[in-house]
Image (spheres, helix red, strand yellow):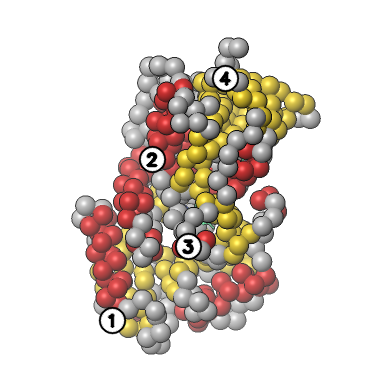
């Protein structure tokens, strides 16, 4: 059977569009099937940070942080209108669990992992400047560290990567739900539902980049394939009227000392995120009342100007699902890197993407293409994703 495409990608989140861009840049024909609209899953519900992930140093995820910092630098260059460097502040209070020396060590390591790039610099904000920090309480405040990371618009970034893929010849079909995949000896037949009818197409390989639906999609394969068991962990954000002029604040939630962020977001103020185990339909995830209260309490604790806010003052809220492959330790301390699972070690026909970070999508999709190279025909590369500009 002749293949219509070298690759069919299931899922139009950041990983799916990243694979499409990487594949098209290598000269492959590629189709993305998205059941809804681009970035309608987790890729529109993130904290919108392009960051190394300072807190992952605590769980020794050094290579993840290194990779993310490298990708951050690259995105700052190729997507300057979508990814911008922002000052982050870490206030340390008497009751903060992580003492100043620990934060200083973390930031020093973070700076080292950037190769002591100017973007890795950090400082202690002098006491006489604390009153300029957007109304941050100074009660029991011992120190404030400032460093830099980047912020993006996750939906716009996903669209920009897809536009780049389209300009290289990739195809996209929205509102197209993959309902069945049949595996042949060296190819796959993909059935998808669009506008009430079922369409079929063939590819040499299928990339399952369906985020929290990853195992639901694998359930549709004939013959059936092994899956990684995953925990889905819900993370919510709230948006309220407010302003943060000085950048982002990275704080310990007063209730349980977890990291939470307060961020400027489109002329408003966004606070996130929570961590709750989730066991339902991924499409049905919504912020819980208790998550909204938790985030409001965190904001009010550090910024007294917001202490009278109630959940009625929340102008928007959204929840997303982290996909954490089951391994050692509890879900919340599990590695946040991507796991790539193929149907067979040689000449894979199917590759599933589990978990990962918005920040590292480009590096991960390079790995996807590398894993699939033995199944794909030789094509003439037409571009290099490290150099392709991304525009909103
Ligand atoms: C709360 C939270 C905060 C986060 N914050 C950050 C952050 O600040 N920085 C960072 O780097 N990372 C962050 N992440 C991680 C990052 O958001 C995710 O790793 C990334 O968005 C996952 O993208 P994805 O493409 O794998 O999945 P998704 O974006 O979920 O895309 C999967 C797509 O597949 C589609 N799909 C599913 N089933 C089918 C089907 N049968 N047929 C066709 N299409 C289908 C869905 O509609 C969906 O659009 C965060 C994650 C969460 C949950």
Give x and y (percent) for residue 359.
42, 48
Q: Mark 1 vs mark 3: give the one in front.
A: 3
Q: CA distance from mark 1 to mark 2?
A: 42 Å
Tell me, yes or no, whether the two marked residues, 4 and 2, touch with CB atoms within 8 Å.
no
Mark 1 vs 4, N-terminal side = 1
Q: Residue at x 33, y 43 (%)?
A: 74
* Residue sitting at the far right: 196
Does residue 237 appear left or right of residue 263 in this picture?
right
User: Could you say whether the residue bearing mark 4 is in a helix, strand or loop?
Assistant: loop
Crowd class of label 3 (few under 14; some 14 to 19; many from 20; radius 10 Å): few
Q: Which residue is label 1 attached to?
A: 128
Q: CA distance from mark 2 to mark 3?
A: 26 Å
Give x and y (percent) for residue 122.
26, 65
Q: CA distance from mark 4 to mark 3?
A: 38 Å
Q: Residue at x 25, y 59 (%)?
A: 111
User: Could you say whether the residue bearing mark 2 is in a helix, strand or loop?
Assistant: helix
Q: Mark 2 vs mark 3: give the one in front.
A: 3
Q: CA distance from mark 1 to mark 3?
A: 43 Å
Looking at the image, residue 92 lies above or below residue 180 = below
Tell me if I can see residue 260 in this picture: yes
Crowd class of label 1 (few under 14; some 14 to 19; many from 20; radius 10 Å): few
Q: Which residue is label 3 attached to?
A: 329
User: Could you say whether the residue bearing mark 3 is in a helix, strand or loop?
Assistant: loop
Mark 4 vs 3, N-terminal side = 4
Does residue 49 appear left or right of residue 270 in this picture?
left
Q: Which residue is label 2 attached to?
A: 363
Task: Specify the label residue 185 is tagged with.
Answer: 4
Does residue 300 appear left or right of residue 69 in this picture?
right
Mark 1 vs 3, N-terminal side = 1
Tell me, yes or no, whether the two marked residues, 2 and 3, touch with CB atoms within 8 Å.
no
């Amino acid at each position: 059977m002749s293949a219509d495409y070298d690759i069919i990608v299931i899922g139009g989140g950041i990983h799916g569009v990243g694979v499409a861009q990487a594949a098209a840049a290598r000269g492959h024909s590629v189709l993305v099937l998205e059941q809804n609209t681009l970035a309608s899953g987790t890729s529109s519900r993130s904290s919108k940070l392009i960051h190394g992930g300072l807190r992952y140093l605590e769980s020794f995820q050094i290579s993840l942080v290194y990779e993310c910092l490298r990708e951050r630098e690259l995105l700052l260059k190729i997507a300057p209108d979508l990814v911008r460097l922002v000052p982050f502040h870490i206030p340390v209070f008497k009751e903060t669990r992580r003492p100043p020396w620990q934060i200083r060590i973390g930031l020093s390591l973070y700076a080292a992992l950037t190769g002591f790039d100017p973007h890795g610099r950090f400082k202690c904000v002098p006491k006489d400047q604390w009153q300029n920090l957007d109304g941050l309480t100074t009660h029991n405040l011992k120190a404030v560290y400032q460093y830099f990371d980047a912020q993006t618009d996750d939906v716009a970034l996903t669209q920009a990567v897809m536009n780049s893929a389209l300009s290289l010849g990739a195809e996209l079909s929205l509102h197209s739900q993959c309902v069945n995949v049949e595996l042949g000896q060296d190819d796959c037949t993909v059935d998808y539902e669009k506008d009430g009818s079922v369409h079929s197409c063939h590819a040499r390989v299928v990339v399952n980049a369906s985020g929290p639906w990853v195992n639901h999609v694998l359930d549709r394969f004939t013959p059936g394939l092994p899956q990684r068991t995953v925990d889905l962990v819900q993370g919510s954000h709230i948006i309220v009227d407010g302003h943060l002029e000085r950048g982002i604040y990275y704080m310990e939630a007063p209730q349980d000392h977890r990291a939470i962020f307060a961020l400027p977001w489109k002329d408003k103020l966004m606070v996130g995120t929570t961590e709750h185990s989730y066991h339902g339909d991924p499409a049905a995830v919504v912020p819980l009342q208790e998550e909204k209260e938790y985030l409001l309490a965190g904001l009010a604790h550090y910024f007294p100007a917001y202490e009278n806010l109630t959940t009625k003052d929340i102008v928007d809220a959204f929840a997303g699902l982290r996909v954490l492959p089951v391994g050692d330790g509890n879900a919340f301390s599990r590695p946040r890197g991507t796991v790539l699972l193929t149907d067979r070690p040689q000449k894979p026909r199917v590759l599933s993407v589990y978990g990962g970070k918005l920040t590292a999508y480009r590096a991960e999709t390079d790995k996807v293409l590398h894993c699939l190279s033995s199944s794909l025909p030789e094509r003439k590369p037409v571009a290099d994703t490290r150099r392709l500009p991304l525009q909103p």
